[in-house]
Image (tube, helix red, strand yellow):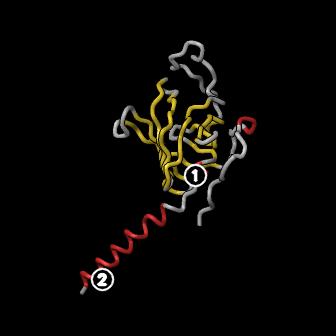
Amino acid sequence: MRLTFLSAAFCLAIAALPAVAADYQPDDITGVWRTKLGGYVQLYQDGDSYSGRIVGSSDGKARYDKKNPDPDKKGRRLLGVVILHGLEYEGDGEYGGGHIYDPNSGKTYKAKATLTGPDTLDARGYIGISLLGKTQTWHRIDPKAEHVHQDLLHHPVGAAPQPEG
């Protein structure tokens, strides 16, 4: 009897999981996100896909593209540079098919992203297959936060963080 109740409860819990994931809409990825290293990237709709541009940083210090393999871009200021493009919505808060430029290495990788909550995004850059890559968790910030360059924001700006509670 007890096993039957636990089995039924487990089945109901598993059945509810897809309903929670299905609440995501394609534009839920739009907004300004703080990367692991403190960069601010605005994700915005760009035609049928999503792109991301550097719009500031938590410390407000200028960073330069020192590792870029293109001599014409080496040393440019990173502020305003599109580092992510081609992300397409695949459903259930998942995006794929994109490419991301890592200014710390000067390399471009395939990219995918997964919303793990309304204000949390796992961004993954990889080579070849997704198993050969690295994931960073990004956190949504207010587009009006200090050191976000308002003149660089693509409009519409996207969501602000959800209030806790």
Q: Earlier in the sequence, mark 2 or mark 1?
A: 2
The quadrant the N terminus occupies is bottom left
What amino acid is found at the position of numbered circle 2 in the picture? Phe
Question: Residues at badges 2 and 1 in contact (C-beta under 8 Å)?
Answer: no
**Where residue 47 sits: x, y (%)?**
64, 40
At horizontal 62% and vertical 34% (from top left) the residue drawn is 54
Give left or right: position of 64 versus 113.
right
Question: Which residue lies under the disc numbered 2?
Answer: 5
**Where residue 161 sits: x, y (%)?**
62, 55
| Residue furthest to the top | 71
2 vs 1, front mark: 1
Question: Which residue lies under the disc numbered 1?
Answer: 26
**Where residue 48 sits: x, y (%)?**
60, 42
**Mark 1 residue element:** helix
What amino acid is found at the position of numbered circle 1 in the picture? Pro
At horizontal 57% and vertical 43% (from top left) the residue drawn is 34
At horizontal 58% and vertical 52% (from top left) the residue drawn is 26
